[in-house]
Amino acid sequence: MDQDYEQFIKNIKSKTGIDLSLYKEAQMKRRLTSLYEKRGFSNFTEFYSGLNKQRELYYEFLDRMTINVSEFYRNYKRWEVLEEKILPSLLERNSNLKVWSAACSTGEEPYTIAMILSKLMPMSKVKVLATDIDDNVIARAKLGLYPERSLNEVPDDMKKKYLKKEGTNYKVSDEIMKTVTFKKQNLLSDPFDSQFDLIVCRNVLIYFTEEAKEVLYSKFSGALKRQGVFFVGSTEQIFNAERFDLSSVDTFFYQKR
């Protein structure tokens, strides 16, 4: 690793608590280099100094680093399985579900979970914890404003009920927004809460090294209730799930044994 990037990693860690060395180096470096070149810097040292002076650039950096490709009901068929199979069986055991959307990005995922839960239980009982490492995406999630392209897979009835057109964007209804609590969290270094019925963490783990994934699977498993369910993204099958006390209950759904 070159010294310029190594120093940048140290500086970012002390500024934000984010440890860039846990991400795949070539991928992350390429992504950040293209950003700083586009913004007129010629190395990581200059770039870091720019980040401290320009708030907009700092937000853009956080955005680029956290790979925000998010939309409501992403991979729709999986959400159908959640609604028709997974949640009804969880609700049979417990009418107050404890639900966590981990690495929630700009909020589309936790709001999707809340919309689905609203069909299965009274709105007053719907509660979703949503966490992410990036203050900027959390701030954006709390605004609840989304471009039309984020809504491609939203069923019409949900769109009518919970999303209102505002200019070229759509705004999530207050009743859905009230059910979600956003918090900042670093998955690798911060402790997890426990006794969750459902944990959703999709399309995030692919960016971690194999060692980091092992740590996270153990932590997620430890945070689940017995028979709680862990829902992962469509490129993230867990091989040897039983090592983490999990067994597959459907494609991309794992149950704590």
Image (tube, rainbow, N blue to C red):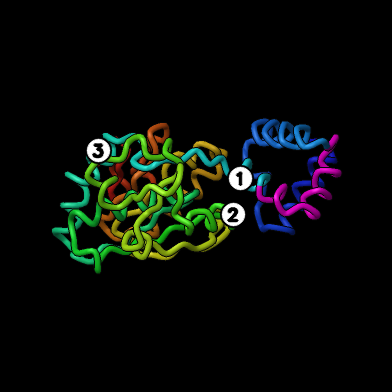
Percent of width and height locating residue 222: 39, 58
Residue in the image at 54% along x and 58% along y: 139
Relative placement, left or right, of 166 versus 156 is right
Numbered disc in front, either 2 or 3: 2
Q: Can residue 145 be seen in the rendering of this structure? A: yes
Relative placement, left or right, of 15 versus 205 is right
The first of marks 2 and 3 along the sequence is 2
Say if mark 1 contacts mark 3, CB within 8 Å.
no
State yes or no: residue 55 in magenta: yes
Say if mark 2 contacts mark 3, CB within 8 Å.
no
Give the dominant element type of the magenta stretch: helix, strand or loop: helix
The residue tagged 3 is 250
The residue tagged 2 is 136
The residue tagged 1 is 63
Task: Give the amino acid at mark 2.
Answer: Asn
The front one of 256 and 48 is 48
Percent of width and height locating residue 115: 28, 52
Q: How many angstroms separate mark 1 from mark 3 (CA)? A: 32 Å
Disc count in the image? Answer: 3
Residue in the image at 73% along x and 52% along y: 12
Q: Quadrant of residue 15?
A: bottom right
Task: Give the amino acid at mark 1.
Answer: Asp
Q: How many angstroms separate mark 1 from mark 2 (CA)? A: 7 Å
